Image (cartoon, helix red, strand yellow):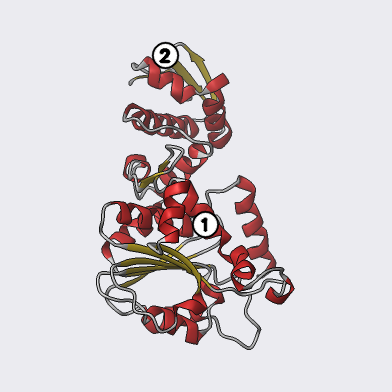
């Protein structure tokens, strides 16, 4: 990419994008990607062919130049821009801890829709690296930060590469305003709604028929936490989701199921505990008990790691402020 700084009080930069195909992808349909850069960095961008002209304050034009250059390099390496990537990229570069390539190009898994699943924030990158290097990892933070989804992607990837012989996914079946007894059907039908998010993530990453075949053979198990008691789990990648709703006893029971050549990832949000007020969340307690043990690591997510609809971050912010 060629660059020229025009003499307009230092506030205008011209960029020549040498790869026409990458330039087209960068601009987006109807220049939608450039509009996102304009909105996020308070600049004006004019495109003509392979030439971009950026106007704004000196600081903003420089930030826009840097952001565009980093995204352009990603596209040249085959990355496919996804909705929200511009805003996410801005957050990453603001933290100045990692390059976009280190994060966006760290492919964990490819979904059945051929979507590349990779980290989108500095903490998500830390999370998957921590899972790679440790046998017990806790991912703690608000909704929408990718805790469960990335853990599932890591499990499917590890299973596909034959690092583990099975995948076990567990959740506590704790009511959040609706009693299990009021739901129709037998016990399995009653707990299915609690396990549905795990099914959804699994079917996003694995062909439906193959996933169902593996579920029928119990190579992949999706079970309520209570069904884990008394088991020893060898050669398995184990995920415990919604762990804030475990009691102290349940958390101890789950962690002591770990067998040889197994890995456990425990996810939860300690601000969303649905246990009775007299019960202590096992996830809250475990941070004090196990934080000093080698091989057990905790990764903390925050609202800046939210990769859902932009309103989700604002909703989390509003609730946090209401509790001050």
Circle 1 SS class = helix
Depth check: 183 or 94 in front?
A: 183
Residue depicted at 37% across the width and 62% down the height? 219
Depth check: 43 or 193 in front?
A: 193
Examine the rendered structure and indicate whether residue 83 appears above or below residue 196. above
Residue depicted at 43% across the width and 43% down the height? 111
Examine the rendered structure and indicate whether residue 199 appears above or below residue 20. below
Bin the neighbour count of mark 2 within 10 Å (Cα to Cα): few under 14, some 14-19, many 20 and up. some
The location of residue 32, given as percent across then percent down, is 56, 26
Give the residue at mark 2: 50
Depth check: 171 or 105 in front?
A: 171
Give the residue at mark 1: 199
The location of residue 257, given as percent across then percent down, is 37, 79
Depth check: 140 or 14 in front?
A: 140
Instruction: Indicate which label's residue lies in the foreground, 1 or 2.
Output: 1
Instruction: Compute the Cα span from label 1 to label 2.
Output: 45 Å
Examine the rendered structure and indicate whether residue 67 appears above or below residue 143. above
Q: Please tell me the numbered disc located at residue 21.
A: none
The location of residue 225, given as percent across then percent down, is 50, 75
The location of residue 272, given as percent across then percent down, is 61, 70
């Amino acid at each position: 990419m060629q660059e020229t700084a025009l003499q307009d009080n230092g506030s205008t930069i011209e960029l020549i994008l040498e790869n026409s195909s990458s330039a087209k992808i960068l601009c987006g349909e109807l220049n939608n990607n450039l509009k996102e850069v304009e909105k996020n960095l308070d600049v004006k961008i004019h495109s003509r062919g392979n030439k971009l002209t950026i106007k704004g304050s000196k600081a903003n034009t420089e930030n826009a130049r840097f952001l565009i250059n980093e995204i352009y390099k990603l596209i040249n390496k085959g990355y496919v821009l996804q909705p929200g990537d511009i805003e996410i990229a801005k957050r990453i570069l603001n933290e100045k801890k990692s390059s976009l390539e280190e994060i966006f190009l760290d492919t964990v898994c490819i979904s059945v829709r051929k979507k590349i699943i990779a980290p989108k924030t500095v903490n998500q990158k830390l999370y998957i690296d921590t899972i790679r290097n440790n046998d017990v990892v806790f991912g703690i933070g608000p909704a929408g930060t990718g805790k469960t989804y990335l853990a599932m992607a890591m499990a499917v990837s590890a299973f596909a590469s034959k690092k583990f012989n099975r995948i076990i996914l567990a959740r506590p079946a704790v009511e959040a305003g609706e009693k299990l007894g009021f739901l129709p059907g037998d016990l399995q039908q009653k707990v299915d709604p609690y396990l549905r998010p795990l099914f959804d993530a699994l079917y996003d990453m694995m062909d439906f028929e193959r996933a169902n075949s593996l579920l029928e053979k119990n190579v992949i198990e999706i079970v309520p936490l209570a069904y884990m008691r008394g088991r020893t789990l060898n050669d398995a990648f184990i995920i415990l989701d919604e762990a804030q709703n475990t009691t102290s006893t349940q958390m101890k029971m789950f962690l002591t199921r770990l067998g040889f050549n197994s890995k456990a990832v425990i996810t939860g949000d300690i601000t969303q505990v649905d246990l009775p007020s007299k019960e202590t969340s096992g996830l809250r307690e475990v941070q004090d008990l196990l934080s000093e043990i080698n091989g057990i690591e905790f990764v903390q997510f925050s609202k800046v790691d939210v990769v859902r609809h932009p309103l989700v971050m604002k909703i989390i912010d509003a609730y946090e402020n209401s509790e001050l």
